Image (spheres, grey):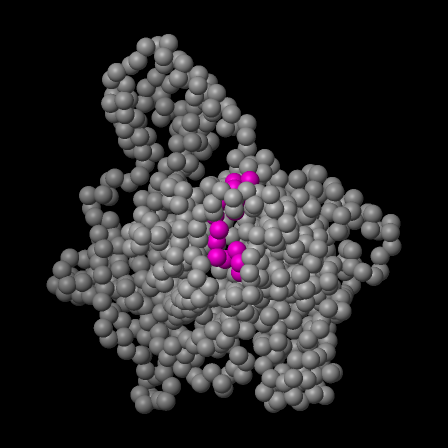
Amino acid sequence: MTTELNFKEQAFLQIQDRPNAPFHSGCKMFTWTCNQSPIKNFTSIEFVNEYTAFLSIKIKQHSEDFGPSKILSNHLDEWHVLLNRYQLMESCHGEIGSNRHMILNQKQFTFMPRAIYQIRFFLQQPSPIWKEFSIVNVQIHSQSSLSKDRKPSIERLLASTLINDDQMTETTFTKIPLITELSQHLQAMWTICAKMHQSDYGSDRIKRFDIDGSYDVQILSST
Amino acid sequence: MNSNIDEKLKQKFLNQAQKLLISSGKSIEDLQTLFRTIQQSDQYPYFQHIFKSTEVIPCDEHKYEIEYLKRGQAAWEKRIVKSLNTMCTEVNLPLARRRNESEMRSVRRHWNELGHISGDLNRFRPVYSAKDFLDVICVLVNPNLKIDEALWNSGLIKIPIVTKSFVEIKAFYSDLCPNIIQYCSDETFNEAKEEENIKLALQILEKKLNIKSVREYARRGCPSSLRGKLWSAMLNIEHCNWHVTYFNYLKQNVIDFDLLVDNLYFKDVKLTAVNDDQLFVFEDYLYQMLLLFSRDTYVQACFTASASGCQPTRSFIKKKSGVEECSVVYPPNGIIPFYGFSMLVAPMCFVFEDPVHLYFIFRQFYIKHFFNLHHISAAPNAIIGLCVLFESLLRQVSSELWFHLQNIQVQPLRIAFKWMMRAFSGYLACNQLLALWDRILAYDSLEILAVLAVAIFVLRKGNVLKESSETAIEAIFSDISSIKVIPLLQFFLGS
C-alpha cells in the first residue's frame, strides 16, 4: 500500500529573533498528519530529492487525541527520531546526488515503528548557492496486513516453485511420443549442448540491427 | 521493483539449492526431505537472512542523474541528428542501404585497403568538433543556482560539481610521486632493473591474479613488450574463438551494408591520422576498426550504463516510419563520430598487431572510458567533471597564472579541452601517449587527463606570463609533442 504525501507549504524555519533576516536558515520542516487510520506495517519511504543536502525524519506513533490516557501517558506523545541527518548529496555545494531518486528503508532507519500517526520531515541545505531545495513525490510504502504473513520464506518459495513445476509436467507430458523417437531427440539435444559448451561464446550477445535483412535508413528521427 | 530483486535472488537460491542437492548425493523423494537437506546446509542461515531483508536497492544508482544535464544532452543529440539529416539531404545519399552484389564483392576484395571504397569525400564534413562541444557545455547552467556565477567561478564551466582537491589528487596518484621509479620511462633505467620488472609482470600475468594486482603493477607503467597483455588483463578481455566469430560477423555487416557514417570515418582518418607522421601507416587498419565499430550493437551498452538516461539515435526502416517494430538505432552502435574520433583508436595500433584483438581492446576501452569524453553527465569521470577539475586545479596550483589569464581574458579550458576530449591522442608523441593511457587503465580513471593538462600549463607558465594576447598564448600551447609525460606528472604531483 502506498500513501502519497503532498506538501504544499514548505516554509523555511526562521531564526528566532530575526524574522526579517536577509538570509534564510537553510532548514525547512513540514509535518503530515494522517486523517484516517494510521500507517501500519510501514516498510519504506520513497522520494525524489531536489537539492536537499540532509534529511531527518521524526514520527509520532500515537494519535494526539488519545482521550484521557493522553494525560496519563504523556511520553506516548513524543516525537521519535526515525532518521537523523541522512546525507543526500555528496557535497552540499556540488551537483552529485541533487536530483537523486531515493528509497529509504529498514537499513537507514533507526527503528521500524509499529504505526505512524504523524510524520515530520526536516530538510537542511547549508550551502547558500542554491535557490530552492525540497523533496518531491514523497510516498510512504507499507505492507497491507494481508501480505504480512506472506513473508518470503524459503519453504514458501520452494513450495510455489515445485507446485508450478508440477503443473508444468502435467500439461506438457500428456502425449509422450515413442521412446526411440524421444531418445533420438534427446541425443541430438545433448550433442548440441556439448558443442555449445565447447565453443566458448563469452558473454557477448548478438543484437542484430537490421530487420529481416533490411537496414535502409533515410532520415533520423529526432525524438 | 521489489519483485525484480526477488526474482534474481530466487534464481540464485534455486541454483545454490540445486548444487547442494547434487553434491549431497542423497535421493530426494518428497518436499519434506528437500527442506531438511537445505536446512542442514551451511547456506541456510545466509539465505534466510537475505530473504528477510529483501527489497534492498542500491541507493547510488541515481546519484549522477541531474535533470538539466539530461535535458542538455538530449538537446545536443537533437542538434547532431539535425546536422546529420541536413548532410544526408545535401549529399543526396541514404543514411544506410544494402550494397548490391558487385559492391559487396568489391568490399570483400579491398578489405585490407578499404580506402578504395571511400568515394568522393569532399562533400562530407565532420559533424562536430571539440570546439562545438565545448560551446554546448559552457552554456549549461543550473536553474537552481542563486549566486551570480561570475562571482564565485571565473572559469568557463558553470556547473557546480565538487571535484578532488590538489591534495586529494596527489594522494590518489601517490604512485607517481618523484621518488618512486616508474617502469620504462625514458630515462633512469639500467637494464638489469628493467629485466626484473618484466619478469615481475610476467609472473603477475601468468598467475592470473585479479585485475587489482595488474592495475597495481601498471600504476608505474607497462613495459612496451607486455603492454598488450597487461591492457587485456586490465580491460578483462581474454582472447577467444568467439571474438574471431564476432569479428567476422561484423565484417559481414560491413560488406552487406553501406552507411553514411562510413564516409565520416573515412574523412576523419584522412583529416587526422593520415596527417600524423607516426600514424599514417595505419590508415587501412583504422578503416577496418572504425567500420566494424560502427556496426557493433554491443556498444549501445554505453547508453544503458550511463546515468544520463539518454537513448541512442533512432530511425525507422524505409517506408515504415512511425511503427515501433521498425525502429532501429542509427548507426548500429549509436555513436555519431566527431572530428578526431579515429585518433582514439590510432595509437592502439602500435600495441596490438592482430586486428581481432585490437578491435576488442578498443571497444572495451571506448565503452569504459572514452565514451565519457563526449557525453554530458555529472559523473566525475565524464568530460564536465574533468573540465571542472582542470579549472579548479589550475586555480589551486598557480593562482598567479590563473589570474593573469583571466586578466587578459583567455580561458585556459579553451586550449585544454581539445586535448582532454581526445585523451591527448594526436598531441603527444605516441610512446608518451601510451604511457599516459597505461595510467588511465591502471587508476581506472580519466582524471589524469585533467592533471596532465594543468601540468602542461604550469610547465609553460613562464612563457604565458610574458604574453598578453590570446593568439600568443595559443601559440605557446600549439605544439606539445615534445613533452615527456611521466617526468612532467612526477614533477607536478611532487610540487
> Above or below — where is B35 with respect to B388?
above
- Residue B289 picture location, percent across and down: 59, 50
Q: Is residue B254 magenta?
A: yes
* Residue situated in front as seen by the camera: B366 or A61: B366
From the top left corner, tell me how far across and down residue B447 is, in percent: 60, 64
Is residue B312 among the parts visible in the rendering?
no
Q: Is residue B67 above or below residue B29?
A: below
Q: Is residue B448 above or below residue B232?
A: below
User: What residue lies at 48% left-to-right and 57% top-to-bottom?
Assistant: B260
Q: Is residue B412 left or right of residue B311?
A: right
Q: Residue at x 42, y 36 (%)?
A: B12
In the image: residue B188, left or right of residue A159: right
Q: Which quadrant of the view contains residue A44?
A: bottom left
Quarter that holds the C terminus of chain A = bottom left
Question: Where in the figure is residue B282, as x and y percent of width and height?
Answer: 68, 54
Question: What residue is shown at x 52% (from left), y 66% (from top)?
Answer: B123
Magenta range: B248-265
The image shows residue A148, relative to residue B449, as above or below, that is above
Q: Out of A175 and A212, give the one closest to the viewer.
A: A212
> Tag count in the figure?
0
Position in image of residue B279 (x %, y %): 70, 58
Residue A78 included in the magenta stretch of the image = no
Q: Residue furthest front?
A: B102
Comparing A169 with B417, the one in front is: B417
Q: Main secondary structure of the magenta part?
A: helix
Q: Is residue B151 visible?
A: yes
